Image (cartoon, rainbow, N blue to C red):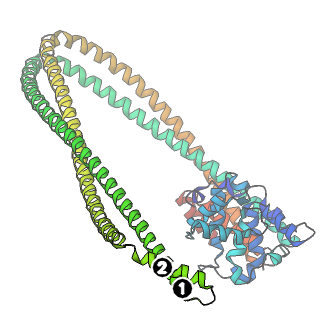
Amino acid sequence: FKRAKNLDPKEFHSNNFLIASTMALEGKNDMEKMKKLNAKTYTEQAVWFLNAYWKQLFEGAEGDKVKTPENLWTWTQLFIELDPKKKKGNELDEFKAHVFLEKIGRTLSVRDMRTYLKSVDIDFNRKVSLTEFLVCHFQDHGVKWQELVNAAQDDEKSKAEREAAQAAVTAASEAAAAARDSAKIARDNESKASAAAREAAAREEVSHAEEKKAKTAEAKCAEVKAIAVAKAAEAKRTEEIAFKTAAEAKASAEEALAKEADLKEAELVAKGKANEAQKAENDAKKAASEAKAALDKVLLEEKKYKDKMAKLAKDKEDMSLGIVKRNKAANLLDQLKSKPTLALQTAKITLAAAEKKADKAKKKAEKAAKKATEAADKISAAASAAEAARKSAVEAKEKADGDAKVAKADREASDEAEKKANLALIAASDARAEAEKAARSAEKARQAADKAKEEAETARKQADGDLEDAQKAMSEAEAKLKELLSKPRGSGQGATWWLEREFAEAKKYMPKAKLAKLAKKMAK
């Protein structure tokens, strides 16, 4: 929207959109007409919608936040801004449509966005035109796309009058833009020429001052030399401080390096302990798993023993079996009862205890591994901090060394300045002669600058005249627009509102003083 507010007036008059918007849509059915409407530019779609629903939605709704036609203006400029084709575009892809919704405060999740876009995409081409968005946005206000594509747009008389007003607005806004640019360039040139004249006069004055300074240079040589000596002494003191700072920085760097080495070594030890703790944890988990497996095996054997005992007892009493089978079952049952089961019970108890012990050891190992890992991470962080401190100390040392070199260079420069002060007296005469020559050159430059200033002033006056002509054209265009708006409106009221809105946008590019003058004139 930011860019839409700063569009050049010429961009608001593309391809005579008002003429195109008044034509009926072609198509064998409503869907074909809808596709034709979607193929129009964003501006043409907006005007079509305003014409169709002016009475129902927009007439007298300037103060209504939902129904004000200003919303359509804003949304149209946003569509143009987001479309790579700009004012020639007609629909946005899913991504750009999502961006549009975010810009107008309709932030949605990806899923909700796709659901919304699917509901908006009337012609199912996976893109969203301005018309499709408007139909969806105003559907609760009685808007139907089938009615929209068949809506009456304009009558021939209104169309002709609006075309005339459109041509006047286009010509006036283009003239205003050109005159504004020319006037700005002329004012800038005039300002530069005035600045150049002032600068030339200042240079002339400086040249005369330099001539005077050259005559007093000898008296100042002693002062310059004293200053140079003082600067050399100060540079030497600065050099000493810098070297001391460098030595301290070196010691700090060495200390930081040692600390870093200690922490790196401690980090290796801590990580080794953490690895050992992790191994112990893994071993404990394995032991616990093996104990459980052994216990499960014993319990299974016990179950098989009990199941077999139960079956033999049942067969022994089952009278449906022959006497031989019953006696065999009784005999086998007695044999099983006579076998000792103490070992099985003992194994079960022992393995259950082992499983409990292994599980306890596993938990202990997990806790130890976690503690060792945390300790290793803490030491690693400290090592990283030490490394950063060491780098900082090295940088400080390098800076101190650089400062010492600069201080030494300053001292040498001060010594050289002292020598040069002894030659200043001889140079003063030459400087006076050069100053006189510079003064003459500066005078010629000032005269040339004054002439350029006069020419720039003439060009600026011409540009102001052009701007006055542009003001007159704007006045005439607004008169035509005012006349059009004063007439009873039939069809095409949305297109008329759009034309009026375009003219208001074009007036933004005229100087405020010119606008005030134009408003005063139109109020008469």
Who's the residue at 66% across and 60% down the image?
94
* Residue 267 higher or lower than 240, as above or below: below
The foreground one among 211 and 390 is 390
Q: Is residue 494 left or right of residue 364?
A: right
Which quadrant is home to the N terminus? bottom right
Position of residue 510 measured from the top left corner of the image (x, y, whole percent): 58, 57
- Label 1 Cα crowd, 10 Å radius (few <14 / some 14-19 / many 20+): many
Q: Is residue 39 left or right of residue 374?
A: right
Q: Which mark identifies residue 248?
A: none
Position of residue 362 measured from the top left corner of the image (x, y, whole percent): 30, 61
- Residue 244: image quadrant is top left
Position of residue 259 measured from the top left corner of the image (x, y, whole percent): 15, 38
The foreground one among 455 and 302 is 302
Which quadrant is home to the C terminus? bottom right
Real-space Cα distance between discs 2 and 1? Answer: 9 Å
Q: Secondary structure at mark 1?
A: helix
- Residue 254 showing in the rendered view: yes
Position of residue 56 measured from the top left corner of the image (x, y, whole percent): 74, 83
Q: Mark 2 — residue?
A: 333
Reading the chain from its start, which is encountered first: label 2 or label 1? 1
Who's the residue at 42% across and 33% down the image?
196
Q: Secondary structure at mark 2?
A: helix
- Residue 483 showing in the rendered view: no
* Residue 21 higher or lower than 210, as above or below: below
Amino acid under disc 2:
Leu
Q: Which mark identifies residue 316?
A: 1
Q: Is residue 489 left or right of residue 83?
A: right
- Label 2 Cα crowd, 10 Å radius (few <14 / some 14-19 / many 20+): some
